[in-house]
Amino acid sequence: MQHQAVFTEQEIMNDALSSEKQVITAYGTYLAESTCQNLRSELVKILSEKQQIQFQIFDAMRQKGWYNTKNANLTDVQNAAQKFQSMKQGMQ
């Protein structure tokens, strides 16, 4: 007798979220290594679409209480932005 695996909605959503994260990473690598401007433009479009899908899955999970996050306070956000802006300027 065969048994079919039964996955919960949470497991399916978690798998979809993980898959989207992996795909986003792969497209980011392809984009970084591409030299053809037409290809780069298409990859940017695809990457943007994939990021939107990833966020929709994440947000649905968050709303159901399956993915808990804490909000960063404004000071932490400003400090991080300043740190990375300084790093960017140092690289120019």
Image (cartoon, helix red, strand yellow):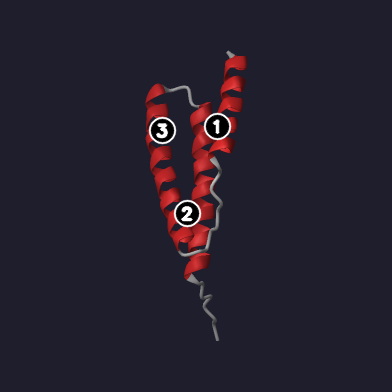
Closer to the chain start, of discs 2 and 3, is 3
Q: Is residue 50 above or below residue 79?
A: below
Position of the N terminus, as image quadrant, is: bottom right
In the rendered image, residue 53, in percent from the top left (x then y), is placed at 41, 49
What residue occupies the far top of the structure in this picture? 92
- Looking at the rendered image, the disc whose residue lies closer to the viewer, 2 or 3, is 2
Badge 1 marks a residue whose secondary structure is helix
Q: Amino acid at mark 1?
A: Gln
Which numbered circle lies on residue 50?
none
Choose between 15 and 35: the one closer to the eye: 15
In the rendered image, residue 29, in percent from the top left (x then y), is placed at 54, 34
- Residue behind mark 1: 78
Q: Is residue 84 above or below residue 11?
A: above
Which numbered circle lies on residue 44?
3
- Residue behind mark 2: 58
- At horizontal 48% and vertical 62% (from top left) the residue drawn is 13
- At horizontal 41% and vertical 52% (from top left) the residue drawn is 56
